[in-house]
C-alpha cells in the first residue's frame, strides 16, 4: 500500500513561486532572459514561474536523467533532449524542480558555461542538501526539504504522481 503525506502544500508552493518570480522580475527586467527548464520535472514550476514573472522571456528545455524508474540516482547522466537555442552572450537562468545529489545540475551548468553566456544562474524550487554529492550554487531557492522521496508538483516516480498539487512524501513502496 502506498502512503502519501503532504510535505509542502499547494498554497505554500504558490506563495513561494510568486516570491521567486518577483525577485526574478526585478533581476531580469529589460534583459529578455533565456530560461532553460530541465525536463520533465521542472515544467510545472517553470510554467507557473514565467506567468508570475510577467516579463518577456525566451524558453528552451533539456532533458537529463539519472533516475529512470529507480528511487535512487544512478549517478550516470543521460541526455534525452538537447538545448536548441544559442546562449552565447545571453542572460541564462536554469529552472530546476529539485537539486538532490547535484550531479545532474552540475553536469548541465558545466556544459552551459562552455557556451559562454553573459550570465548563468540557477533557480530551484526544492533543495535536498543532505543528499548532496557535489557542491552546486543555487542562486534562487524556494524550499529546503528533508531527505525523503518526494513527488508532486511535476516531480514523479516512474511517471506517476506529477499531477499532485502539493509536494508529498511517498513513505512506502509504490506498487
Image (cartoon, helix red, strand yellow):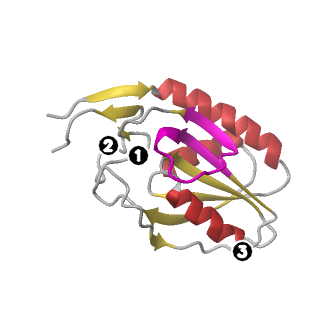
Q: Secondary structure at mark 2?
A: loop
Q: Which residues are magenta?
A: 122-143
Q: Quadrant of residue 118?
A: bottom right
Q: Residues within 10 Å of mark 1 (few under 14, many from 20)?
A: many
For the question of whether residue 153 can be seen, the reply is yes
Residue 167 located within the stretch drawn in magenta: no
The residue drawn where x is 65% and y is 33% is 18
Residue 53 vertical placement versus 168 (above, below): below
Residue 48 vertical placement versus 91 (above, below): above
Question: Going from the N terminus, do you reach mark 3 or mark 2 first?
Answer: 3
Q: Nearer the viewer, residue 32 or 24?
A: 24
The residue drawn where x is 44% and y is 57% is 40
Which label number is shown at residue 161?
2
Distance from Cα at disc 3 to Cα at disc 2 = 35 Å
Q: Secondary structure at mark 3?
A: loop
Q: Quadrant of residue 75?
A: bottom left
Residue 137 located within the stretch drawn in magenta: yes
Side of 131 where 110 appears, left or right: right
For the question of whether residue 38 can be seen, the reply is no
Q: Secondary structure at mark 1?
A: loop
Which residue is tagged 3?
Answer: 115
Where is residue 32 shown, x and y percent of the image? 79, 57
Which residue is tagged 1?
Answer: 155
Question: Going from the N terminus, do you reach mark 3 or mark 1 first?
Answer: 3
User: Of circles 3 and 2, which is in front?
Assistant: 3
Which corner quadrant holds the N terminus? top left
Does the CB distance between marks 1 and 2 fall below 8 Å? yes
Amino acid at each position: 500500500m502506498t502512503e502519501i503525506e503532504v510535505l509542502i502544500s499547494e498554497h505554500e508552493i504558490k506563495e513561494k513561486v510568486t516570491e521567486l518570480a518577483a525577485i526574478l522580475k526585478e533581476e531580469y527586467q529589460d534583459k529578455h532572459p533565456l530560461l532553460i527548464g530541465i525536463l520533465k520535472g521542472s515544467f510545472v514550476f517553470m510554467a507557473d514561474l514565467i506567468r508570475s514573472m510577467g516579463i518577456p522571456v525566451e524558453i528552451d528545455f533539456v532533458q537529463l536523467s539519472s533516475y529512470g524508474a529507480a528511487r535512487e540516482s544512478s549517478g550516470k547522466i543521460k541526455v534525452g533532449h538537447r538545448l536548441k537555442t544559442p546562449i552565447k552572450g545571453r542572460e541564462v537562468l536554469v529552472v530546476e524542480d529539485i537539486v538532490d545529489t547535484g550531479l545532474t545540475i552540475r553536469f548541465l551548468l558545466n556544459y552551459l558555461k562552455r557556451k559562454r553566456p553573459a550570465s548563468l544562474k540557477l533557480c530551484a524550487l526544492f533543495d535536498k542538501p543532505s543528499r548532496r554529492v557535489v557542491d552546486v550554487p543555487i542562486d534562487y531557492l524556494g524550499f529546503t526539504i528533508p531527505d525523503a522521496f518526494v513527488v508532486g508538483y511535476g516531480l514523479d516516480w516512474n511517471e506517476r504522481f506529477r499531477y499532485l498539487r502539493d509536494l508529498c512524501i511517498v513513505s512506502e513502496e509504490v506498487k
